[in-house]
């Protein structure tokens, strides 16, 4: 057994991790930009998002677990984008009408184009194919 003293950094990191354990480590690592493998920013296979009517006309809906945001600018028109902020990799936290917010650093995105409305992000959200199939939204490759 080593008798080497524990460093300040080790103590601080341990305290941060133990405090974050009850909140889930996902929040701690979402913006880290280092270490570990990140999930892809967009789906690698088709994803069933549920009823198309769940996205209001003139609004958007965030599918946080699927890391997607879908807007419905007009009846019968849907646009989907990856919901991973292009600044530091955080998943968007909310949408209001046709704007998506990332609370990690304040970036805002247009959910009909993916374009950045406010930084620090400087790259748009990646577009994801989306279609309505049997009244349900399907997003991702092959959609």
Image (cartoon, grey):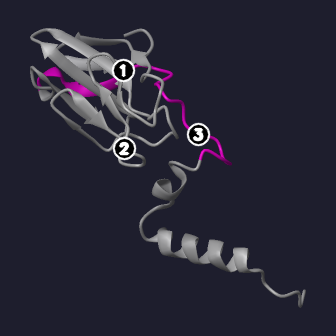
Disc 2 target residue:
106
80 over 68 or under it: above or below: above
Disc 1 target residue:
115
Is residue 141 inside the magenta stretch?
no
| Label number found at residue 38 | 3
Residue 131: percent from left, percent from top: 28, 11
Label 1 element class: loop
Which of disc 3 and disc 2 is earlier in sequence? 3
Number of other residues with Cα within 10 Å of mark 2, as a class: few under 14, some 14 to 19, many 20 or more: few
Tell me the chief SS of the magenta region: loop
113 over 13 or under it: above or below: above
CA separation in Å, label 2 and label 3: 21 Å
Give the mark toward the camera: 2 or 3.
Answer: 2
Given residues 94 and 44, the one toward you in this image is 94
Given residues 111 and 120, the one toward you in this image is 120
CA separation in Å, label 2 and label 1: 14 Å
Which of disc 1 and disc 2 is earlier in sequence? 2
Number of other residues with Cα within 10 Å of mark 3, as a class: few under 14, some 14 to 19, many 20 or more: few
Q: Which residues are magenta?
A: 33-53
């Amino acid at each position: 057994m080593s008798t080497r003293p524990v460093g300040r950094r080790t103590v601080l990191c341990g305290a941060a991790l133990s405090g974050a354990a009850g909140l889930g480590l996902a929040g701690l690592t979402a913006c880290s930009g280092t270490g570990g493998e990140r999930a892809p920013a967009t789906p690698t296979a088709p994803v069933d998002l549920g009823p198309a009517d769940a996205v209001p006309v003139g609004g958007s809906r965030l599918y946080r677990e699927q890391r997607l945001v879908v807007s419905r600018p007009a009846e019968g028109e849907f646009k989907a984008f990856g919901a991973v902020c292009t600044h530091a990799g955080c998943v968007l936290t909310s949408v209001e009408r046709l704007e998506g917010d990332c609370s990690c650093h304040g970036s805002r995105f247009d959910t009909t184009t993916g374009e950045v409305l406010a930084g620090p992000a400087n790259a748009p959200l990646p577009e994801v194919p989306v279609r309505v199939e049997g009244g349900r939204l399907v997003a991702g490759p092959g959609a």
